[in-house]
Each structure stands twice: as C-alpha cells, then as structure tokens.
Image (spheres, rainbow, N blue to C red):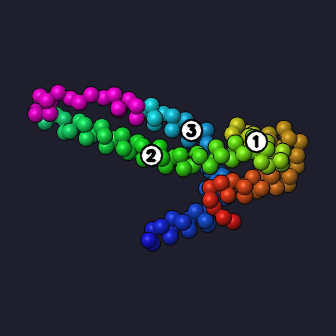
Amino acid sequence: MQILKYFLGAIFVKGKGYVERCLWEYRENVAMIEHLREVCQGLMSVRGHSYEAHIAGSVTNPVLDVTHKRMKLEGRISRIELRVKPVERLNKDIANGAYNDRHIREVLKLRYMEHHSVDAVMDRLHISSSTYGRAKEKLLRVACKYFGIGE
C-alpha cells in the first residue's frame, strides 16, 4: 500500500512533466511497441530444441524460456501502451474538433509530434512566446485529463 501511495504521489506531483514526456516520446513509443510485437511474433515461431540437447544440459527448458521471454515482452508492451493510448485519444479528439483552439492543435502537432523547436513553432504559427506558453499550458491541462491526472 505504501508503494502505491508513493507511486500515485509521484504522478500527481510531477503530473505535467510526466504528460509532457509522454507527448514528446509518443513516436518513439509507437515504434518500440511495433518492434516488440515483431520480436514477440518471432518468439512464437521458435521451435523447441532437440531432446538430445536438453539431455546434454546445454538447454534448460526451451519452451518455458520462450514463454517467459514472451510474457516479459507483453508486459513491457502493456506498460508502453499506458503512455501511448491517452495520446492517441487526445490526437483523435483534437483532429475531430473537440477542442477548437488552433494553437493547441498546432502546438501538439509541431512541437510534440514533429519535434520542432519552440522558436520554430512560434515562427511557423506567427505567435509570441506568451501565446505559445498559454497554448502549451492549455494543451498540458487537457492532456492531463486524458491521463487521468487531476490538477
């Protein structure tokens, strides 16, 4: 119980930082999920070793080893999906017009999905640094709701 309180406290204390990191790492996380799924598929096609190799002691239990590796990979995929799914829902809702603020939509796209610098985003949108700051704060407040982190 104490660990859960610590974990939840860390999320609430650093809520916006966590959400911003999830937004920033979205593309990398999606690529990692695809890679891990390919590895998982490859493990599913691995055949067991011969009986002679097992008797000789060179292989411990190939079926259990592969199953254990696959379970670890699936757990890792699930943990990464916890960071990816809220961002996908946010992207979908913004694309469908749930939030009519153009600056939020463009900051999400340019800064977090395409990894442009802050100056490049401000130049492209023709906005000041204070307008960028307000749009970013509003985006992070909205994204926190998708991650279930209250303000």
Examine the rendering and report whether any part of residue 133 can be seen. no
**In the rendered image, which quarter contains the C terminus?**
bottom right
- Does 50 appear in magenta? yes
How far across and down, in percent of the image, does residue 57 sit?
Answer: 13, 36
What is the secondary structure assignment of the residue under circle 1? loop
Residue that label 2 marks: 76
How far across and down, in percent of the image, does residue 51 sit?
Answer: 13, 29
Q: Is residue 139 left or right of residue 10?
A: right
**In the rendered image, which quarter contains the N terminus?**
bottom left
Is the residue under label 3 in contact with that under label 2 (CB below 8 Å)? no
Q: Classify 10 Å Cα crowding around label 2: few (below 14), some (14-19), many (20 and above).
A: some
Residue positioned 36% across, 40% down in the render: 70
- 136 or 117: nearer the viewer: 136
Q: Classify 10 Å Cα crowding around label 3: few (below 14), some (14-19), many (20 and above).
A: some
Residue that label 3 marks: 30
Say which amino acid is labelled 1: Asn
How far across and down, in percent of the image, does residue 56 sit?
Answer: 10, 33
Q: Where residue 96 is drawn, which disc sits there?
A: 1
Report the Cα–Cα distance between label 1 and label 2: 30 Å
Residue positioned 79% across, 49% down in the render: 99
Q: Is residue 29 above or below residue 143?
A: above
Decide which of tag 1 and tag 2 comes sooner along the chain: 2
Examine the rendering and report whether any part of residue 101 can be seen. yes
For residue 150, which quarter of the picture?
Answer: bottom right
Q: How many marks overall?
A: 3
- 56 or 74: nearer the viewer: 74
Camera-near label (3 vs 1) is: 1
For residue 114, which quarter of the picture?
Answer: top right
Give, as a single range, the part of the protein colored magenta: 40-56
Residue positioned 62% across, 49% down in the render: 86
Say which amino acid is labelled 2: Arg
